[in-house]
């Protein structure tokens, strides 16, 4: 495809990457195992940049992201690989204020998807769907792992990881909430307590 037929975003990404690659320096020599031996599980929210909020450079740490930063089976799969094969020894679970996962429930998502597959809209009365085309009931059978209380969700996820039989007792797991208004990480001491190594 020529540049004219590519989307604006594709062109921007390719251009930015070219600049990045031109200044790649000695990054080709970074070893695969994270140099600072830790992992972060956090939300995909576009306002969160773990490299910036936690001071990471290439090669420093593993960052696992999903909607909410939840400790799903797949997140735990990644964490176990991170430890067992790549040597991380400390893990952070970092949720955040104003998370999109606070704005809906399993029922709402199931309803929206049943009305249409197109994007929903949100206003002060909540989420609405255009109903523009056929939807699916598949969304009713998924646990979307929505969040009703930030602190509770962090504690729950640290606990879920801690109690997984593939996770060794000597890994420290810390719970934090990133504040989208200040950029600060606030520790949830009860979560860190649950995640304490033994
Ligand atoms: Zn979020």
Image (cartoon, rainbow, N blue to C red):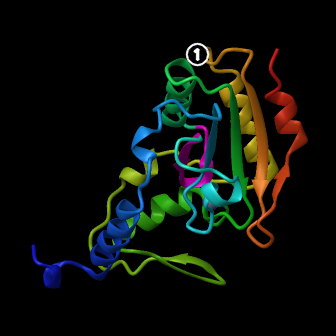
**Which residue is found at the position 53% from the left and 36% from the top?**
75
Q: At which x and y percent is residue 163?
A: 69, 21
Q: Is residue 145 left or right of residue 25?
A: right
Q: Can you say which quadrant of the picture contains the N terminus?
A: bottom left
Q: Residue furthest left?
A: 1
Q: Is residue 2 above or below residue 31?
A: below
Whether residue 149 is visible, yes or no, is no
Whether residue 118 is visible, yes or no, is yes
Q: Nearer the viewer, residue 77 or 48?
A: 48
Query: Alpha-carbon neighbours of circle 1 within 10 Å: few (<14), some, or many (≥20)?
Result: few
**Which residue is found at the position 44% from the left and 47% from the top?**
26
User: Is residue 65 found inside the magenta-colored segment of the image?
Assistant: yes
Whether label 1 lies within 8 Å of ligand 1 gets the answer no
Q: Nearer the viewer, residue 52 or 29?
A: 29
Q: Is residue 31 left or right of residue 34?
A: left
**Which residue is found at the position 73% from the left and 46% from the top?**
153
Q: At which x and y percent is residue 10?
A: 28, 73
Q: Is residue 182 left or right of residue 64?
A: right
Q: The residue tagged with tag 1: helix, strand or loop?
A: loop
**Which residue is found at the position 82% from the left and 37% from the top?**
191
State which region is magenta: 61-71
Q: At which x and y percent is residue 129?
A: 44, 77
Figure quadrant of residue 158:
top right
Q: Nearer the viewer, residue 96 or 132?
A: 96
Q: Is residue 148 above or below residue 123?
A: above
Residue bearing mark 1: 166
Figure quadrant of residue 18:
bottom left
Q: Is residue 170 above or below residue 144?
A: above
User: Is residue 44 found inside the magenta-colored segment of the image?
Assistant: no
Q: Where ligand 1 lies, by image quadrant?
A: bottom right
Q: At which x and y percent is residue 2?
A: 10, 78
């Amino acid at each position: 495809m020529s540049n004219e037929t590519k989307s604006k975003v594709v062109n921007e990404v390719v251009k930015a990457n070219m600049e990045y690659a031109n200044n790649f320096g000695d990054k080709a020599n970074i070893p695969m195992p994270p140099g600072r031996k830790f992992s972060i599980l956090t939300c995909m929210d576009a306002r969160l940049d773990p490299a910036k909020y936690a001071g990471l450079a290439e090669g420093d740490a593993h960052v696992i992201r999903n909607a909410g930063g939840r400790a799903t089976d797949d997140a735990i799969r990644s964490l176990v690989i991170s430890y067992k094969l790549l040597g991380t020894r400390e893990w952070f679970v970092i949720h955040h204020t104003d998370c999109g996962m606070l704005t809906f429930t399993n029922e709402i998502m199931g309803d929206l998807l049943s009305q249409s597959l197109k994007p929903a809209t949100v206003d002060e009365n909540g989420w609405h769907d255009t109903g523009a085309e056929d939807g699916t009931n598949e969304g009713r059978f998924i646990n979307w792992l929505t969040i009703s209380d930030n602190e509770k969700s962090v504690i729950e996820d640290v606990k879920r990881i801690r109690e997984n039989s593939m996770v060794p007792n000597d890994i420290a797991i810390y719970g934090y909430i990133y504040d989208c208004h200040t950029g600060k990480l606030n520790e949830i001491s009860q979560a860190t307590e649950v995640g304490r190594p033994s």
